Amino acid sequence: MPFKFWKKEEKKPAPPPPAKRGGPPAAKPPARVVEKPAPAPPARRTPEDIAIEIHKGLVEGGLTIEGTREVFKKRVTEKFGSLTDFEREMKEDPQATVTGFVTSWLGFTVPAKFSLKDLLYSANQRLSSFGIQVSAGDEVSVDQGAGLREATLTLGDESSVVEFQTPRTVFNQINAMIRDRGVQLIELETWSDGYAFMLVRSPNWPALAREELVVVKSEETATSRECRECGSRVGERWATCIACNARLEA
């Protein structure tokens, strides 16, 4: 009979002696206290980190494209002196600082007392990139005291008569005329009597309504409260109502 020499008999350990009845219970070893390391303090964001984060918000809102990040940082540096100076001004007045910068970079301003010719010149400079040109003719004064005017806007074979007191009314009519062209003129807050606008391809209205740094004025971003003068919905950080132009309380 062959020996299974490759296997060894394992000796079973002897069973522990039975505990003596009535004796004191065995003492439990003290619980081991594991000290957790203190959490590391959050890393401080650099001025460049902040600039990149702001640019990301502009991209998500449909105001620019990802490929403009370096151009954005360059323009910020040109306007404010450095990214550090930009961060400092942002801390003092975030909305006005960023919205004003976006206006100077991508948009244009229109004074409260405006010429229709100058207004269309600024708009057509942007629209021409998409093969669009809007002209105006037959401008007349309807109510000189109220500043109400009337003009005929023409785009290709389409013409439309518009009565206006503010640049906003003119651009609303232009938007109606170019609604199938894939672009739109949107208004930015200025916190002044003047106006600011920019041309965009596809604004992301839900993102712009949530945006905390760039204040866009539109019915789609009027999600905060009501105007005391006319009852229209207005945005949280708007200075004036887009329906009646009344001043809004902060």
Image (tube, grey):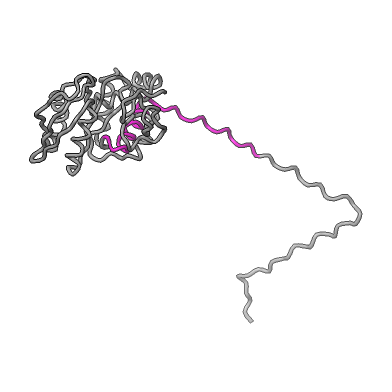
Is residue 59 in the magenta section? Answer: yes
**Side of 69 relative to 27 (left or right):** left
Is residue 2 in the magenta section? Answer: no
Residue 174: percent from left, percent from top: 18, 35
Q: What stretch is highlighted in magenta?
A: 34-63
Residue 53: percent from left, percent from top: 36, 32
**Side of 118 relative to 27 (left or right):** left
Give the quadrant of the N terminus: bottom right
Using the image as rendered, state which of residue 33 and residue 14 is in the foreground: 33
Tell me the residue at 23%/23% (across/down). 109
Residue 211 visible in the current orientation:
no
Tell me the residue at 20%/42% (across/down). 179
Classify residue 197 by image quadrant: top left
Using the image as rendered, state which of residue 171 and residue 203 is in the foreground: 171
Residue 159: percent from left, percent from top: 11, 37
Q: Residue 21, relative to residue 36: is it above or below?
A: below
Residue 175: percent from left, percent from top: 20, 37
